[in-house]
Amino acid sequence: MRPRRGAALATWAAPEIISVHQRDTPATHDAFELTVTFARFLLPHIFFYGVFSIFGQVLNARNRFGAMMWTPVLNNLVLVSMFGLYLGLMTAPEQVSDVTDDQVRLLGIGTTLALALQALALVPYARAAGFRFRPRFDWRGTGLRKSVNAARWTLLFVGWPPPTPCPTRSACC
């Protein structure tokens, strides 16, 4: 599955993904909703990690290693700035219900922006290395069948049996 589709599907299914790990009960509803909101901000990172990996591998194949090594520094600079802004402007919440929409947006948008910058910063380097994006759909004879079959079996083994939520918190911790 391409990163774009996987990220969109995971973002859409955020409540179901979160419900595997956290129950939505009246006592924990605020925490569940906050977790789903953060998941909707953070699951698109799948796409940006995919873009970063693809362009990084294009650069590696062309013996250009510096950009993939240094673009995470951009990510870190944005994250450190964002967390500094968070600590300077916001008060630390005591409880889940104290977390404001502004805090969630700052953290969600800041982390996504940092990763997007890291991924998209590789585009000029890939172009300078001679890479031009031209989609090709002549996949016959490329050896993908073995990879797809291996991936299918891997997903089957990882996904079977389906995970079940813990009956009690103390049983899982």
Image: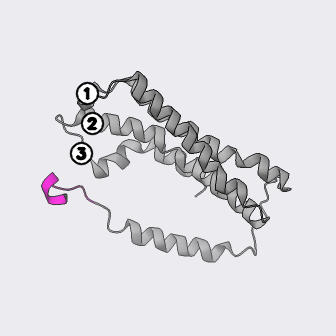
Count neighbours of disc 2 (C-alpha within 10 A) and say few if under 14, some if 14 to 19, many if 20 or more.
Answer: some
State the count of labels.
Answer: 3
Residue 54 visible, this angle: yes
Q: Residue at x 42, y 22 (%)?
A: 89
Any mark on residue 23, and which? 3
Circle 2 residue: 31
**In the picture shown, does residue 36 fall above or below 94?**
below
Closer to the chain start, of discs 3 and 2, is 3
At label 2, the amino acid type is: Ala
Q: Give the spatial CA distance, label 1 vs label 2.
A: 8 Å
Where does the magenta region start and end? Answer: 164-172
For numbered disc 2, what is the local secondary structure? helix
Circle 1 residue: 97
Q: Look at the image and say whether residue 167 sits in the magenta stretch.
A: yes
Q: Give the spatial CA distance, label 3 vs label 1.
A: 17 Å
At label 3, the amino acid type is: Arg
Any mark on residue 29, and which? none
